[in-house]
Image: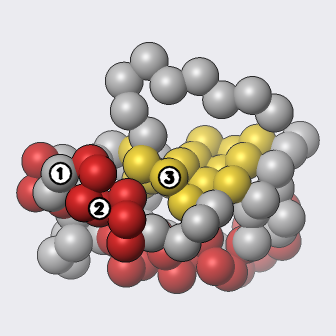
C-alpha cells in the first residue's frame, strides 16, 4: 500500500525499487554515520529515500553512534525524521 518498513538491510534490488516509489510513509534503517557491513549508514539511507521519494520517511535502527536526536534531526531533509520509541505514524 502506502507504507513500507525496511530494516536490518543494506541493499534493495533495482527490480524492487519500483514497488517503493512515492509511498506515503517509508521507515528505513540508518545505523550510524560511518559505513557498516550490513546496514545503511545515514548517507546511504538518505540517498535511498531520495531515490524512492516517499512523502515522509522515518529513520529507525539508529545506534548511539548517530548522535543526539535533536542535533541529527536538524541535518535531515524536511520530510525525513528520526524515529523514536513509541512513535505512532498515521497514514
Residue at 50% across / 52% down in the picture? 81
Q: Nearer the viewer, residue 81 or 11?
A: 81
Q: Position of residue 58 (x, y in %)?
A: 53, 49
Q: Which residue is mark 2?
A: 72
Q: Residues within 10 Å of mark 2 (few under 14, many from 20)?
A: few
The residue under the point 42% across, 48% down is 82
Q: Describe residue 47's horizontal placement relative to residue 85 as left or right.
A: right
Residue 44 image position (x, y, % from top left)? 41, 77
Where is residue 55, by image quadrant?
A: bottom right
Q: Real-space Cα distance between discs 2 and 1? A: 6 Å
The residue pinned by badge 3 equals 81
Q: Is residue 20 visible?
A: no
Q: Residues within 10 Å of mark 3 (few under 14, many from 20)?
A: some
Q: Position of residue 40 (x, y in %)?
A: 36, 67
Secondary structure under tag 3 reads: strand
As drawn, the residue found furthest toward the right would be 1
Mark 1, secondary structure of its residue: loop
Specify the farthest residue to the top.
86
SS at mark 2 in the image: helix
Q: CA distance from mark 3 to mark 2?
A: 9 Å
Q: Is residue 63 above or below residue 47?
A: above
Q: Given contact means CB atoms under 8 Å apart, are the residues at marks 1 and 3 in contact?
A: no
Q: Are marks 3 and 2 in contact (CB under 8 Å)?
A: no
| Marks 2,1: beta carbons within 8 A | yes
Q: Where in the figure is residue 5, as x and y percent of width and height?
A: 60, 43
Quadrant showing the N terminus: top right
- Relative to residue 75, is residue 31 depicted above or below? above
Is residue 53 in sight in this rendering? yes
Position of residue 20 in the picture relative to residue 43 (left or right): right
User: What's the residue at 75%, 62% (across, down)?
Assistant: 54
Circle 1 residue: 68
Q: Residues within 10 Å of mark 1 (few under 14, many from 20)?
A: few
Amino acid at each position: 500500500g502506502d507504507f513500507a518498513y525496511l530494516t536490518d538491510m543494506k541493499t534493495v534490488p533495482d527490480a524492487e525499487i519500483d514497488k517503493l516509489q512515492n509511498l506515503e510513509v517509508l521507515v528505513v534503517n540508518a545505523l550510524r554515520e560511518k559505513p557498516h557491513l550490513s546496514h545503511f549508514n545515514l548517507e546511504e539511507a538518505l540517498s535511498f529515500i531520495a531515490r524512492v521519494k516517499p512523502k515522509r520517511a522515518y529513520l529507525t535502527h539508529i545506534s548511539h553512534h548517530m548522535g543526539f536526536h535533536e542535533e541529527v534531526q536538524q541535518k535531515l531533509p524536511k520530510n525525513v525524521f528520526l524515529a523514536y520509541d513509541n512513535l505512532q505514524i498515521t497514514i
